Amino acid sequence: MAIEPLFGTRAQKAFIITIAIQAIVVITMVALTFGMVRTEVGSTFEELGYKTLPCYLALFILAELFELVMAFDALRSRNIIQLMGIVLFHAALIVFSALQVHETHVAIFGCQSSCVTDPNNLWDKVERFLIVAPCIIAASWFFLIFWIKQLYAEFGWVIFHVVGANPKFKSMYQFYQIFICLLKFDFFCFVGVTMQLLIVVLNTSSAEFGVTIAAIPVVLILLAGCARSVRHEVKWLMVTSLVLMVAAMTYLYKLVRFYEPSSEQQYVSTRATLTVFTVVAFLLLLASFGIGIKCFRDFDKGLHESKTHGQSYTPVKMQVIDAFRMGGMAERQSSYFPGGAPLQQQISIE
């Protein structure tokens, strides 16, 4: 079976186009909501508790761009596990967009009566755009599931080319792919939580603001170190990354800050989204830690070349089999068609 070029099939084109179209529509809806509230409130926008809306817009732009890049990367590398992750991520976007309807309502009605001339009229203007976003995301999710079934049939055989038909190697390589995929989603959740804290909640003069800023390069180095260590099987770096990953899980303490009486008021307009992001980030980090240990145990077991070169690497066993197969095909062809050109090499999953 020949390897199809990137966007060489209808399913590949339809998958990326579906994500791109829904991203444009959703970002447009959110931008319209932000623009209407900004116009209505005017120069007092920053002081009146409406920071939820620019955060909402920034998060959706980040989420849609992240999903588009992840989809392109999954199609380029023919990574069916990452495609499954995208479908789950898209389902999470449905929940997130539904939460934003509630939180925007809280932001509009939670301020003082003098914040806008007619808060009910403002809500009536923006409510329709807020409702459209989860509806569009949900509709596109069903299309993605339809196309991913075809992509599964198209990409499912690729792992044989990378690691051969050995079930043990196949299992180890799949855990490696899951780990790398989890690290990418860890990155998004961390950026999402940090963005909300910096835009909506934290005062630039507070100690918590400084700690949050300082955590950004540490977490980015952690994720990059994990990816490099598991790909190149660097044991000391992998151990260090796993230890730092456990330390990063203490970020869950933020949940206490969201709900304790002394600080709950500053989180009121974005508490639901922050809670969901924080819990999901913790669960993803916990899953990454567990699978990271499994990947660490698989070091020095023969997968280094496959992980380093990906589809460009053909296992030695497959190379030998292909060489014999090509020799046999060439002899058969020359006996039936003297002077004919040898057949091109093809991938087999036998």
Image: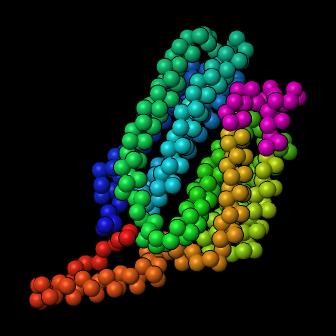
The quarter holding residue 339 reads bottom left
The residue closer to the viewer here, 267 or 243, is 243
Residue 269 image point, x, y percent = 70, 26
Q: Main secondary structure of the magenta part?
A: helix
Q: How is the image coloured?
A: rainbow
Q: Residue visible at 40% across and 63% down?
A: 157
Find the magenta span and give its range. Answer: 252-276
Residue 222 image point, x, y percent = 71, 61
Q: Is residue 253 magenta?
A: yes
Q: Quadrant of the C terminus?
A: bottom left
The residue closer to the viewer here, 96 or 61, is 96
Can the viewer see residue 80? yes
Q: Residue visible at 19% across and 85% down?
A: 332
Can the viewer see residue 162? no
Q: Is residue 284 magenta?
A: no
Residue 172 image point, x, y percent = 59, 66
Reply above or below: 133 against 216: above
Q: Quadrant of the N terminus?
A: bottom left
Is 327 displayed left or right of 122 in the figure? left
Reply above or below: 16 against 24: below
Reply above or below: 125 against 254: above
